[in-house]
Every structure is written in structure tokens, then in C-alpha cells.
Image (cartoon, coloured by chain):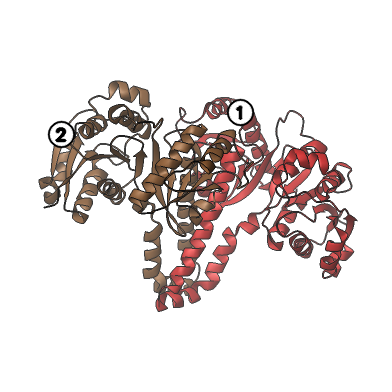
Chain colours: A red, B brown
Amino acid sequence: MTKKVKIAIDAMGGDHGVDATIPGAAKALDKDGDLHFLFYGDEAKIRPVLSKYPKLKASSETIHTDHAVRGDEKPAAALRTGRQSSMRLAINSVSNNEADCIVSSGNTGALMAMAKMVLKTLPNIRRPAIASVLPSKTGRTVMLDLGANLSCDSEVLIQFALMGAVYARVSENKKNPSVGLLNVGSEDMKGHEELRAAHGVLSRVQFPGSFKGFVEGNDIPMGTVDVVVTDGFTGNIALKTAEGVGKLTEFYLKETFKSSLLATLGGVLAMPALKKMKQKVDPRFYNGGMFLGLDGVCLKSHGSSDDVGFCSAIIVAANL
Amino acid sequence: MTKKVKIAIDAMGGDHGVDATIPGAAKALDKDGDLHFLFYGDEAKIRPVLSKYPKLKASSETIHTDHAVRGDEKPAAALRTGRQSSMRLAINSVSNNEADCIVSSGNTGALMAMAKMVLKTLPNIRRPAIASVLPSKTGRTVMLDLGANLSCDSEVLIQFALMGAVYARVSENKKNPSVGLLNVGSEDMKGHEELRAAHGVLSRVQFPGSFKGFVEGNDIPMGTVDVVVTDGFTGNIALKTAEGVGKLTEFYLKETFKSSLLATLGGVLAMPALKKMKQKVDPRFYNGGMFLGLDGVCLKSHGSSDDVGFCSAIIVAANL
């Protein structure tokens, strides 16, 4: 008999709260019957949604709390006043070994601050990072940091490179992942001092991957390397720009297939293939920012994610 | 009779040198008969290419020089040793009033350093920025800085916001351009200190546009604002990421239309419409980074641009 994976869910997090987290968990349970959920949040809101999913109800427990961290709350304030929040109690359950991992689509800053305080960073890791996997020409590219640390010195960037390489080995099954540092040019002399210093060290040291030097923005979707390392400010903007261009392309394609009778007919014929392509790049299937560097598995789902997106995040967490 | 626009061309710049710059100028002359070119560079290389375009030959002069700035040359070195380079002589011609503007696809750092030294910055402008226009859902979005200044303090960001607004009025014909500061979230408290300080000032002062606060990466392709302001590091990475995603989408689309017989037939029927869409987003038609804040028109074309791309840059320069 397989051991059940216990997943703590911050049921109140994100733009859609229980309307995304509970149906998302139900979808995840359909894909993987070995999951067991601990829902943290307002029972009065959880119960009516949960009652629609009898199978999920049987594979879950609800732990009631009135308090939820707001989306605009400052991390320090959330730490101070959020001790009984759904987010905090869900994180606690991982540190108490009641759950194997925690998934939340709530306030990123608060989640990182609480997870760092409760779960602690791994030995010798100064700062945790948010990593995610993006679709690329060669398959899938791991990128970090996506927003946990606005600016990073060279030591932190070096640690991110190591953590990213380890993550690519474990979650992407890459034996010798190639790692690149994101910069404005590939020449050694380019970019901020922190980047050049990190480049110098990574070119010399042994680590669980191969360092390929600097990469540029276009190398992310091209999949030039398996792991792209950058600070949280740049990473967040690159990720959101890429998602925006994806949406713009979808909009243009829709317009294109409406622009003439022939184009519409062509669109109808190609529809099954286009749908497959859409699925391949759908950001919802790449949802789930992994907090690397913590002594415990904590996954951040997009604040705006729906049930499909939240389900992807759960599946990522369950497989780690 | 219309006055001829005189355009100085660094004929040796970019990955393709005279094979892109001369045919690009020929294409531009086809579109606008009022152009006159001054080609700076190695006459022995220019002559054979120019001889293929008799009309262009008649509307141009070649000024010979042996020296060209290398792509990997450091700006300081280029300044010191490049006084007789094609790039430098072309810039000089603008400050001597021999030409109205200069276009180069050579080394960005060297071009900026030389243009700044020769043309000088406008009164009260501390640092020039590279601005360009990108396709967006609402039409066209101006973005700056795209790589001239790796890091920017709040004062520089404020000046970029003003210059960007003026540029959008002049080149995009927008009467009251909306301006946003690129950040990792739209809440006032987010992001680096420089960004928050710039946000504070821009929210208070009168300037030739409307300040819309912080915008995020996805707002660039969505066209949420007319002008997106950021530092040169972030801007360069966002731009190249967007271009990379565009290329990846093209690759996926080609694969999709080959994936089944029906899809191929659909692709054939929709081809004319798809071609139109491709043209709409083709980065070559958005080529041309304008150096804002200089007392003279200097345009940087992509280093990798072909004749079509170089032609677009010339057309942008000629219309300013």
C-alpha cells in the first residue's frame, strides 16, 4: 500500500479563495488518489464548496480558523498578527509533520516570511528563492528567483545556481543540468558587479550541473540552458512579460482566424492541433512556484489561479 | 520641393555590416524618395554592394575610413581609439550639421558613449536612454530604457518618464500619453526604493502625460499604458524575453500546422491571414532604438538586423 501524501492547503488564499482551492484539490485527487488534504480556513466557507465533492470530503480534514492574511498585507504585519491565519496554520502543519507539504495562493511576501520563520532555511542557505518551470523550445526550463528577493548579491546568486541545479535534477530528472546567469549580454564584462562576481565563482567551482555563463532574455523561451538564475525583481518581470506575450499572441490568433472566411475555415480544421498547442503553453499547467532553500516543501500558486492552476500546483508539491 | 533628409549611416556596424546597411538603405529609399545617405566605412567593402543599387548610389556619398568599432570593444576603449571609426565619423556629421540623424547597428555601449560625448545631452538631462516601440494589444507601447543604463536612481527614472511621454507625443501622436513604472506589483509599497521614490514624485508633478503608477511585466504586451519606464537592465531583459517568446510561438505554430493532415490544410487556408499577423509582430518592423535625451537624433538598430530591420530603423530616424 502506498503511503498517502498529506497536503496542507491554505484554503482562503488567492483571488478566488475556496472557489479555486477546493475544486483544485478535487481535480488533483482525481489525478492522484493517494492524496490526503488538510484544509485550513473558514469552515463556513469551506463546507458548502467541499460538499460538492464527496470523494474529496472523504479524503480531507478541515481545520477551522477565522483569520486569513490579506493580499495587500505587509509581510512583517502578517508575521505579527497572522499567527492564527489559515496560511500560518497550514505552514505549521508541515513543521509539526502533520503534513508533507503546503500549497497557498495567498500573499507571496507573507507566505515567504512565514515559511522562512517556521520551516527555517537549509544549512548554509542565506535566502530562499521561488523557482518555477517554464515551457521552452527544448522542453522545460527552470527559472529562479521569481520574486522572493528583489535584489541579490553574488553569494545569493551563487546559492540560487546550486539550488536551481539540484531542483532540475530532482524535479526535471536532468542528470547534469546546464545553468546560466541572466544578463544583458553574453560577454564576461557585461552587467552588474554582483553578476560578474557570481560568474567568476561559478566558472571555477564544482557543483551539481554545468555553468554555461551569461544568458539573455531570449534564452529563457529558447531553452538554451536548463536553469536560468536571476534576482527576484528581474525574474518576476521576465516571467510576467512572457505570460503577457503569450496572452497577446492568443488574442492575435483569435483575431486572425476571424479576419476572413478562408482563415475561419482554416482555423476550424486546425482547431484540434491548435488546442494541443495551447495546452502546451497554458501558464496554468506551469503553475506552482517552489520555495527552494527551506527545510520543508512550500509551494506558491499564482494569486489569480483558478481550480486548474491550483491543481497543477498541488501536483507539483505532491511529487517532490 | 521637399528638403532632403540627410542620414548618416555607420555602414560597418552590426553582425552583417555592409550586407545589411546598404541594402537596408536601398529599401528605405524605395519607401521615401526624399532621403539622402552619407555612408561611413571601408569604401572597398561599400562599393561592390552599393553598385547593385544605382538609385541609392545616386542619392548617397561614401566617406572612407579604415577603422570600425568592434562589437566586443569596451565603450571607454572605443572612445579613446575610435576617433576615425565609421561610427564616430557618422556621429560627428550630425554635430557638424552635415547630417540630420545617424543610424548604426554597431556596439551599443560605444555608440551611446560617443553620441553622448559628441552630441551632448539636452539641458537638465542627466543620462540618455534607449527607447523603442513594441507591439501591444492596444496598438503600440513605448518602452525605455532598453539598455543604456544598467541601474537608475529615482531622478533618472523620473527624467525617463518625462522623455518617454514627450517621445510618445511626437512619434506616436498621443496627446496625453499614459506612463507607468515597471515593478513587481502594482501596490505603492512594492519594489526597490528608487522606484517608490520616483512613484512619489511622478504622482505629484505636472508633466506632458498622465502617470498611472506601477505596472507589471504583462502590462507591456497588454498595452495598459502608452509608455513603460524602467532601468536599462530590466528593460533589456524584458524586451529580449518578449522577442524570445515570439520566436517560440512561431516555432510552435509551425509544428502545429505540420502535426496532422487537417492542421496542414487549415494552415494553408489561413496562411494569408497568418502572414499578416506575423508582419504585425515581426520584431524587424519595430527595429530602431532611439537615443532619447541627446541634442541630436541617434538611432541604434539591432546588431543582428538584416536589411529589412535596418530599413525600419532608417525610416524611424527619418521621421523624427
- Give the residue displayed 55% in from the left and 72% down from the top: A272
* The image quarter in which residue B282 lies: bottom left
Instruction: Indicate the chain on which mark 2 is placed.
Output: B
Q: Residue beneath label 1, please?
A: A153
Q: Is residue B304 visible?
A: no
Q: Secondary structure at mark 1?
A: loop
Instruction: Indicate the chain on which mark 1 is placed.
Output: A
- Give the residue displayed 46% in from the left and 54% down from the top: B246
Residue B240 coordinates in the image, percent (x, y): 46, 45
Q: Secondary structure at mark 2?
A: strand
Residue A256 coordinates in the image, percent (x, y): 44, 69
- Say few, some or many: other residues with alpha carbon within 10 Å of mark 1 (under 14 / 14 to 19 / 20 or more): some
Q: Is residue A51 left or right of residue A222?
A: right
In the rendered image of this protein, does residue A150 appear above or below residue B29?
A: above
Q: Is residue B50 left or right of residue A55?
A: left
Q: Residue beneath label 2, please?
A: B63
- Give the residue displayed 75% in from the left and 51% down from the top: A104
* The image quarter in which residue A168 lies: top right
In the rendered image of this protein, does residue B69 appear above or below residue B101?
A: above
In the rendered image of this protein, does residue B270 appear above or below residue A284?
A: below
Marker count (numbered): 2
Residue B263 coordinates in the image, percent (x, y): 48, 71
Residue flagged by tag 1: what amino acid is it?
Asp
Q: Nearer the viewer, residue A296 or B39?
A: B39
- Say few, some or many: other residues with alpha carbon within 10 Å of mark 2 (under 14 / 14 to 19 / 20 or more): some
Residue A73 coordinates in the image, percent (x, y): 73, 45
Q: Nearer the viewer, residue B113 or B182?
A: B182
Q: Is residue A112 left or right of residue B76?
A: right
In the rendered image of this protein, does residue B118 appear above or below residue B191?
A: above
Q: Is residue A273 visible?
A: yes
Residue at the farthest top position: B80
- Marks 1 & 2 on one chain: no
